[in-house]
Image (cartoon, helix red, strand yellow):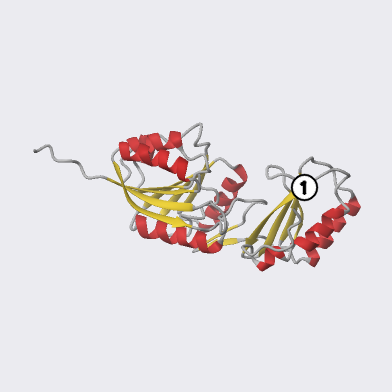
């Protein structure tokens, strides 16, 4: 479908479609296809063009893409897949600012769909875990729900470019306030004993949820868990695991950031239920 206008996308992104089409029209070989990931950062648009079948860019094609980046005032234009993205031109270093933390995201980084939804979720996390001193952020991505807050945050993420970006931000920040650890939580979840050192845990897993990690969370003594989800089914499964482990669902906030679609983001707070009295 030839999309000419979209009422749920910012004007800046919609305005990028015509020049992006023109730049790619004479660049892709016959029968080839590509998509683009575009992030609206604090320094401008960060674009990653992903050919579905990788091929080498000629000098002329490279220059055509550079001219497109100049004309569209892009912050950065990259080529390839996320794991091997090649920046073709960086006019301004893309930045994401969260409180006192400035992150330089890798090309094609995962972000929440809208700034308003992201801020609503950040505000809920900050309000719900309150005075927590040590916070674990699981399936953290770039830590958009936890970084830039007063607590000491430890982020666990399987995407190496995102981990590297957070590590660099942590070094600039100093004081050990922000730490990132590369870990595949689907295959290697944090054990209950690892989790018990934290005052609160925040997790925002992919649509598949966090079945294995929820089992360990249910066995832990973490006082507060904030769970973000984009799939009610996997959330219900993992919530049941937490409830069976003694947690209580205290708050739940739906976030409709995918307008005119059936998809709903949600964020929920689980707290340790008080021990029942042994008296009748």
Q: Position of residue 25 (x, y in %)?
A: 85, 54
User: In the displayed structure, does residue 109 sit left or right of residue 183?
Assistant: right
Residue 103 makes an appearance in the image: yes
> In this orientation, which residue lies closer to the viewer: 207 or 63?
207
User: In the displayed structure, does residue 83 sit left or right of residue 231?
Assistant: right
> In this orientation, which residue lies closer to the viewer: 34 or 56?
34
Query: Compared with residue 233, is residue 42 higher up or lower down, i.e. above or below?
Result: below
Where the C terminus falls, by quadrant? top left
- Which residue is pictured at 53% across the width and 51% down the height? 263
Please tell me how crowded label 1 is: few (under 14), some (14-19), or many (20+) other residues with Cα within 10 Å: few
User: In the displayed structure, does residue 241 sit left or right of residue 8?
Assistant: left
- Which residue is pictured at 51% across the width and 31% down the height? 187
Count of labels in the image: 1
- Which residue is pictured at 46% across the width and 38% down the height? 210
Residue 176 makes an appearance in the image: no
Q: Position of residue 55 (x, y in %)?
A: 83, 42
Q: Which of the 4 image quadrants contains residue 3?
A: bottom right
SS under mark 1 = strand
Q: Residue furthest top?
A: 187
Q: Position of residue 47 (x, y in %)?
A: 71, 56
User: In the displayed structure, does residue 63 sit left or right of residue 232?
Assistant: right
- Which residue is pictured at 57% across the width and 58% down the height? 260
Q: Position of residue 116 (x, y in %)?
A: 52, 64
Query: Compared with residue 28, is residue 92 higher up or lower down, i.e. above or below?
Result: below
Q: Which residue is disc 1 drawn over?
A: 34
């Amino acid at each position: 479908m030839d999309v000419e206008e979209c009422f749920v996308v910012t004007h800046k992104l919609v305005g990028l479609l015509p020049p992006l089409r023109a730049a790619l029209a004479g660049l892709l070989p016959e029968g080839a296809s590509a998509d683009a990931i575009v992030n609206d950062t604090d320094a401008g648009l960060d674009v990653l063009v992903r050919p579905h079948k990788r091929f080498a860019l000629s000098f002329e094609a490279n220059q055509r893409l550079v001219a497109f980046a100049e004309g569209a005032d892009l912050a950065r234009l990259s080529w390839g897949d996320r794991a091997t993205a090649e920046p073709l031109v960086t006019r301004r270093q893309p930045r994401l600012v969260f409180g006192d933390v400035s992150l330089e995201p890798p090309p094609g980084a995962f972000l929440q769909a809208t700034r308003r939804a992201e801020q609503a979720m950040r505000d809920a996390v900050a309000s719900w875990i309150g005075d927590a001193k040590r916070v674990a952020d699981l399936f953290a991505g770039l830590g958009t729900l936890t970084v830039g807050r007063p607590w000491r945050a430890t982020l666990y993420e399987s995407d190496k470019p995102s981990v590297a970006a957070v590590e660099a931000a942590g070094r600039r920040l100093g004081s050990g306030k922000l730490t990132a650890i590369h870990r595949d939580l689907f295959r290697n979840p944090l054990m209950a004993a690892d989790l018990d050192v934290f005052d609160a845990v925040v997790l925002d897993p992919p649509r598949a949820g966090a079945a294995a990690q929820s089992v360990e969370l249910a066995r832990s003594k973490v006082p507060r868990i904030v769970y973000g989800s984009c799939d009610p089914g996997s959330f219900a499964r993992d919530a049941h695991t937490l409830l069976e482990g003694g947690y209580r669902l205290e708050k739940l906030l739906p976030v409709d950031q995918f307008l005119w679609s059936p998809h709903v983001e949600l964020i929920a707070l689980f707290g340790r239920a008080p021990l029942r009295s042994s008296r009748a």
